[in-house]
Amino acid sequence: MLNFDFYAPARILFGRDTQKEIGALLKPHAKKVLLHYGGGSIKKSGLYDTVVDSLKESGVDFVELGGVKPNPRLSLVYEGIALCKKESVDLVLAVGGGSAIDSAKAIAMGVYYDGDVWDIYEESKPVDKALPVATILTIPAAGSESSGDTVITNEEKQMKLGYGSPKLRPLLSVMNPELFFTLPKNQIANGVADMMSHVFERYFTNTTHTDLTDGLCEAILKTIIKNALLVIKNPQDYDAWAEVGFAGTVAHNGLVGMGREQDWACHGMEHELSAIYDVAHGAGLAVLTPGWMQYVYKDNISMFLQFAVNVMGVNGSYRDPEGMILEGIARLREFFAKMGLPASLAAIGIGEDQLELMAKKATWAAYGNEEYPLGGLKKLYWQDVLEIYKLVK
């Protein structure tokens, strides 16, 4: 096990009607907030009115900025920064899923940054100060409600980059599984693929003596697999949603990655799909993850055998570990299919014409600088990334 420093201060308020408490929760921390959200779904559902009423009743002033899209855009972040500065906002409240929360975090750190906030993403500049962020989660997927991470798409450059800092962990997050009841099934499936990938990126490692976090990863994955099928069947199953929602939070608050080298190759490869083709992040991960497993498993047979047995329930002869591993990967593909997720790049509208460019962008080989291979379990250079794209085309 490696040395680590774990700090996860985000307060999670879980359960029925917790969204009604948001005004009282924020009053000790803010006089004026930016209410940040996506399209019209929170207004159709009545959540917008609930939040506004709660803020008003508690005497918390607010301004608002809607319009967050999946793969949140840098252009809207710029608008939010300018609005916060103009209105002297002292907290950003994101109501939505990972896109709204990631956009809120970008705004929060951009308010105090003396330059273009995109520089922080592109050059990994340190963040010394950021506005506090609070969230009301409407889509369990990204885990952004408790993480210090944010991902933003630069439309002009066709780049999608992530950034992480302890300064960006939300002050508090509200999670009521009832708010998930009206989600379309494709969003449910995409969210499940995303949260599972957050575990996979940490679970598959060359670090040894990680029994505790191995077990935590496996428990989260099995919990998601079991309960995701229940919510797809009945989107109003509160108990199943509670399991899935909380699993998504624990999957990405950092705990299950402590003491182990992490990978993150699949996320790096998928960001290129989203940046150029604007595909749903979870759908892209569902396509890439089994292909990545197929390409790298021989570099750590024991780790993938453990996954096949402990997560996917494969039984077989240990004299044939590769057969068991391939069965585990096949079962993962089968689960994704049951969720209605795509199995190929073609299924999400991606042809072969941009594969080499995306592979080079993913490793920065396209920018004329030093190449930065993806992954921890196996280093992937652009040629490797290209081969994985081809495996799942």
Image (cartoon, helix red, strand yellow):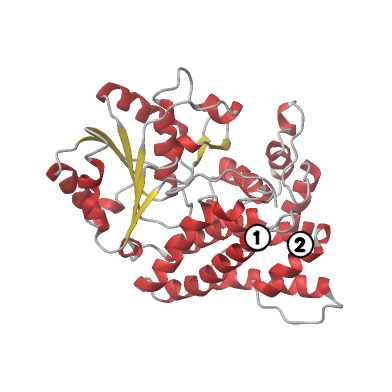
Q: Nearer the viewer, residue 66 or 2?
A: 2
Whether residue 335 is visible: yes
Q: Amino acid at mark 2?
A: Gln
Spot occupied by residue 50 in the image (x, y as percentages of width and height): 19, 52
Give the labeled residue for mark 2: 294
Farthest residue to the right: give it. Answer: 319
> In front of the other: label 2 or label 1?
2
Q: Is residue 132 left or right of residue 348?
A: left
Q: Which quarter of the rendered picture does the C terminus lie within?
A: bottom right
Whether residue 348 is visible: no
Q: Nearer the viewer, residue 354 or 234?
A: 234
On residue 391, which mark appears?
none
Q: Tell me how far mark 2 sits from mark 1, CA to CA.
A: 14 Å
Identify the residue shown where x is 73% and y is 60%: 293
Spot occupied by residue 137 in the image (x, y as percentages of width and height): 36, 53
Label 2 secondary element: helix
Vertical arrangement, residue 236 with respect to residue 362, above or below: below
